[in-house]
Image (tube, rainbow, N blue to C red):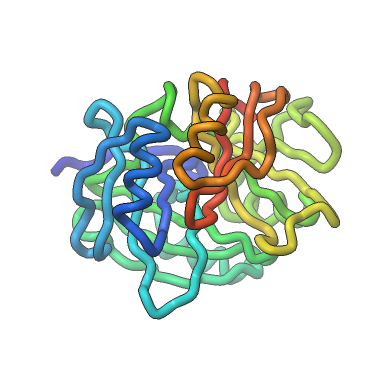
């Protein structure tokens, strides 16, 4: 394996889903997005890499059977120094839950949470750089933090990765788009009392689809749920869905915040 192409620190580079039923989850997303699957790094336990046309899109791993954790998608942000980023997380008021640890020859990872409790990953690439399928149906195209108030969250993540707000990119109150190396990378949206109490602050991954209305219907047929019905927005027509284990994600017709 060769050294992965470097990604700008703070750029979303991978998404991973941890679930209790690996086979059933693979079937759901395979039917919904057309993913195929290959084994992941043995160091990570039962783990599958989702592929589109042979290119990595996302990962799906198995939660410990003795822990009642809900399934959820985790976004990984690129770092040149996972250990240094972990220390910055602690200093900025966040929590390091896992790592830093090596994932074989692929790279080094950390699982963290910000001060509001939103979980995210940090990835220092070695042989594996992350998602290699960019754009098109079935690929992750945007990442948004839903939190109580945007300002403290923006301050935390800017401390870690040096993001800059994109002027004029907001599509509503308490919404900030952050850039890495001058390019839009992710967004932070403060929901105040509208933040779902059962999930709290959390990151969401947006997957591109050809038809959000059809994707919402298909997700429901496959045992998932439609949490927000398809609607038009600044980033394109989109819907918020949950898979059969309750992991929340968004499908969108076009990429962007």
Residue reaching furthest to the bottom: 66
Determine the residue located farthest toward the left in the rendered image: 1
- Residue in the image at 19% along x and 55% along y: 105
Could you say where residue 242 lies in the image, as x and y percent from the top left?
55, 47
Say how many tags the image has: 0
Judging depth in this view, the residue of 144 and 213 nearest the camera is 213
Please state which of residues 124 and 244 is positioned toward the viewer in this rendering: 244
Q: Is residue 216 above or below residue 146?
A: above
Residue 196 higher or lower than 255, as above or below: below
Residue 60 in the image: state x and y as whole percent. 35, 52
Q: Is residue 5 visible?
A: no
- Residue 165 x, y percent position in the rendering: 71, 36
Image quadrant of residue 135? top left
Residue occupying the point 64% across, 49% down: 158
- Which residue is most to the front? 221
Residue at (69%, 49%) from the top-left corner?
A: 146
**Front one among 38 and 22:** 22
Q: Is residue 133 left or right of residue 169?
A: left
* Quadrant including the N terminus: top left
Taking the spot 65% from the left edge, 48% from the top edge, the residue there is: 145
Task: Locate residue 194 relative to residue 36 in the image: left or right.
Answer: right
Task: Locate the C terminus and report the quarter of the image it occupies.
Answer: top right
- Residue 71, given in percent of the width and then of the height, sits at 48, 60
Q: Left of 151 or right of it: where is 139?
A: left
Res. 241 visible in picture: yes
């Amino acid at each position: 394996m060769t050294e992965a192409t470097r990604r700008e620190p703070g750029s979303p580079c991978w998404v991973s889903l941890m679930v209790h039923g690996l086979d059933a989850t693979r079937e759901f997303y395979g039917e919904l997005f057309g993913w195929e699957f290959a084994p992941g790094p043995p160091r990570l336990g039962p783990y599958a890499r989702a592929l589109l046309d042979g290119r990595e899109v996302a990962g799906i791993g198995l939660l410990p059977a003795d822990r009642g954790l809900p399934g959820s998608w985790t976004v990984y942000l690129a770092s040149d120094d996972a250990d240094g980023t972990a220390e910055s997380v602690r200093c900025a008021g966040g929590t390091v839950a896992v790592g830093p640890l090596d994932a074989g020859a692929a790279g080094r990872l950390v699982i963290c949470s910000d001060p509001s409790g939103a979980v995210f990953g940090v990835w220092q690439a070695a042989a594996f750089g992350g998602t290699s399928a960019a754009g098109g149906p079935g690929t992750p195209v945007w990442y948004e933090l839903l939190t109580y108030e945007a300002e403290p969250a923006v301050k935390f993540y800017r401390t870690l990765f040096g993001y800059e707000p994109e002027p004029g990119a907001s599509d509503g109150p308490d919404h900030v788009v952050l850039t890495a190396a001058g390019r839009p990378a992710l967004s932070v949206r403060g929901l105040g009392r509208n933040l779902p109490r059962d999930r709290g602050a959390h990151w969401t991954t947006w997957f591109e689809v050809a038809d959000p209305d059809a994707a919402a219907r298909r997700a429901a047929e496959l045992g998932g749920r439609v949490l927000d019905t398809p609607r038009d927005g600044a980033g394109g027509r989109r819907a918020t869905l949950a898979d059969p284990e309750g992991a929340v994600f968004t499908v969108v017709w076009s990429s962007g915040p």
